[in-house]
């Protein structure tokens, strides 16, 4: 119907009314969404749409190679907005956190950012992060690539916190040879609240970009419940471990890379991150229609839970402990376990199965118990990756048509697998 892409300015003509705004990713029920100049989003039933006129290409199409930013003495940071609580405010009609700040409003709320850097601000999406799908990773990765090509010194991505660690993993794989910092920042409390963590998280991310030689994908969120410092966490080894606290994110099986305060004081805990360089970014995107599941094993499991995945492209099992599933038929109550085992065997002939641990911390080891030894012929060890990172890695490898999935999954490609396990990090 139209050549317009997400991010373009469009006019949507319907049977009753016309809407002008920026085309956003479609809603889950397949409506067009456009962002109006008021900052609000409106959903438009596709059946009502007569025509979509492209008014102006969005920033994703930009090919400009010029260095941006007004003050030559300051670095230039691009802030890409994707939505989430950080971009939200309380809707005082409903009491819910829904209505969104525009990128400009959000930056204007924290004027000190402009004293630290030339801030470019772009809208990539305006959604809650639980709605993110693989095409959104591609949109985001391309948006980062465009900024890097434009010569920015760093990129900050404002993002919903719920799946921020999936997105950081997706970008870590998609953006190969990344020579600049890309820091994801969220907030657990909306930006219009006194207790919001948005300001500190944004300022600390900016300070870290300005005052370190870090390159790569990281997450910047509160270090603890005091409102005075943030940590920079590795994009591939981080999880959201609390539903509401501002210090909800922790690194898993490794130390955070650094802490940073709002004045720019940085303490490096682990210097193994990549450093800035001017190499050429190697963008490798996700196939958008892959079907990959994550299944948690549990007591009283039934074989159908495994059989559900027979037409999937891959499955991550979050096993118990060292990577276990209920596959031992030991008494009159466990006869189903033989079928569970057979279903795992059957599925493994069709699709890669990666075994991670639901403990979060620690490493899968399929050699210790007889259960693991039974399973190890049919599942691939997720080593010490979180199930979220293993999920994204599998999706990305399948997207590259990788032939040797089992070999690549256990190989450390981007810092997702630690060479040794240490229990000092829990
Ligand atoms: N669930 C929403 C999201 O992840 C809001 C939570 C947040 O941003 O902290 O986008």
Image (cartoon, rainbow, N blue to C red):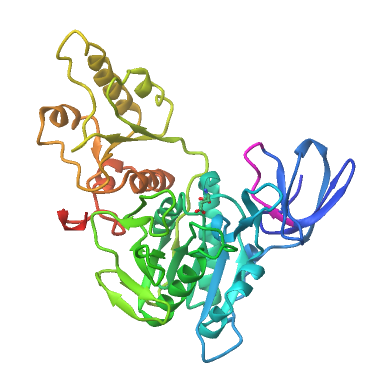
Depth check: give the residue in front, 385 or 177: 385
Q: Quadrant of the C terminus?
A: bottom left
Q: Give the image location of residue 354, x and y in percent.
A: 29, 37
In the drawing, does residue 193 fall left or right of residue 243? right
What is the magenta range? 22-29
Name the residue located 25 percent from the left edge and 69 percent from the top edge: 272
Give the image quarter of residue 344. top left
Q: Could you tell me if residue 321 is visible in this image? A: yes
**Of all residues shown, which one is farthest toward the right?**
16
Residue drawn where x is 31% and y is 71% of the image: 258
- The relative height of residue 369 versus residue 402 in the rendered view (above or below) is above
Residue 342 horizontal/vertical position (percent): 26, 18
Q: In this view, does 390 lie to the left or right of 423?
A: right
Q: Is the magenta stretch mostly helix, strand or loop?
A: loop
Q: Residue furthest top?
A: 332
96 and 179: which is toward the camera: 96
Q: Does the magenta stretch include residue 166?
A: no
| Image quadrant where residue 229 sits | bottom left
Q: Quadrant of the N terminus?
A: top right
Residue at x-position 23% and y-position 23%: 326
Q: Which of 301 and 138 is in front in this view?
A: 301
Residue at image x 57%, y 62%?
Answer: 193
119 relative to 15 in the view: left or right: left
Image coordinates for residue 203, horizontal then vertical, percent: 48, 74
- 74 lies above or below 300: below
Residue 137, percent from left and from top: 51, 52
Visible in this render: residue 278?
Answer: no
């Amino acid at each position: 119907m139209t050549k317009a892409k997400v991010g373009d300015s469009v006019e949507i003509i319907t049977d009753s009314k016309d809407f002008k705004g920026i085309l956003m990713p479609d809603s889950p029920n397949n409506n067009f969404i456009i962002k109006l100049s008021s900052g609000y989003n409106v959903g438009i039933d596709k059946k009502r749409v007569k025509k979509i006129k492209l008014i102006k290409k969005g920033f994703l199409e930009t090919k400009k190679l010029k260095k941006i930013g007004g003050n030559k003495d300051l670095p230039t940071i691009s802030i890409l907005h994707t939505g989430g609580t950080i971009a939200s405010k309380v809707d005082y009609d409903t009491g819910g956190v829904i209505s969104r700040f525009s990128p400009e409003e959000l930056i204007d709320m924290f004027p000190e950012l402009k004293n630290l850097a030339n801030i470019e601000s772009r809208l990539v999406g305006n959604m809650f992060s639980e709605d993110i799908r693989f095409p959104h990773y591609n949109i985001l990765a391309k948006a980062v690539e465009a900024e890097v090509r434009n010569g920015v010194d760093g990129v900050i991505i404002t993002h919903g916190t719920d799946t921020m660690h999936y997105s950081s993993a997706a970008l870590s794989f998609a953006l190969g040879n990344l020579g600049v910092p890309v820091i994801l920042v969220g907030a657990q409390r909306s930006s219009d609240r006194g207790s919001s963590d948005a300001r500190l998280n944004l300022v600390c991310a900016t300070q870290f970009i300005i005052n370190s030689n870090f390159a790569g994908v990281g997450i910047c969120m509160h270090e603890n419940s005091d409102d005075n410092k943030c940590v920079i966490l590795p994009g591939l080894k981080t999880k959201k471990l609390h539903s509401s606290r501002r210090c909800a994110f922790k690194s898993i099986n490794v130390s955070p890379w650094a802490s940073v305060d709002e004045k720019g004081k940085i303490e490096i805990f682990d210097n193994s991150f990549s450093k800035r360089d001017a190499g050429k970014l190697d963008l490798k995107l996700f196939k958008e229609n892959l079907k990959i599941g994550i299944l948690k094993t549990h007591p009283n499991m039934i074989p159908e839970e495994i059989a559900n995945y027979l037409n999937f492209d891959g499955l991550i099992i979050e096993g118990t402990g060292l990577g276990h599933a209920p596959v031992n038929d030991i008494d009159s109550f466990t006869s189903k376990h033989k079928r569970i085992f057979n279903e795992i065997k059957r599925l493994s002939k069709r699709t890669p199965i990666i075994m991670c641990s639901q403990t979060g911390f620690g490493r899968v080891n399929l050699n210790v118990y007889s259960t693991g030894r039974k399973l190890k012929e049919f599942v691939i060890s997720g080593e010490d990756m979180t199930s979220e990172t293993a999920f994204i890695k599998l999706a990305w490898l399948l997207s590259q048509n990788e032939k040797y999935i089992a070999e690549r999954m256990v190989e450390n490609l981007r810092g997702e697998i630690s060479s040794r396990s240490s229990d000092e990090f829990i």
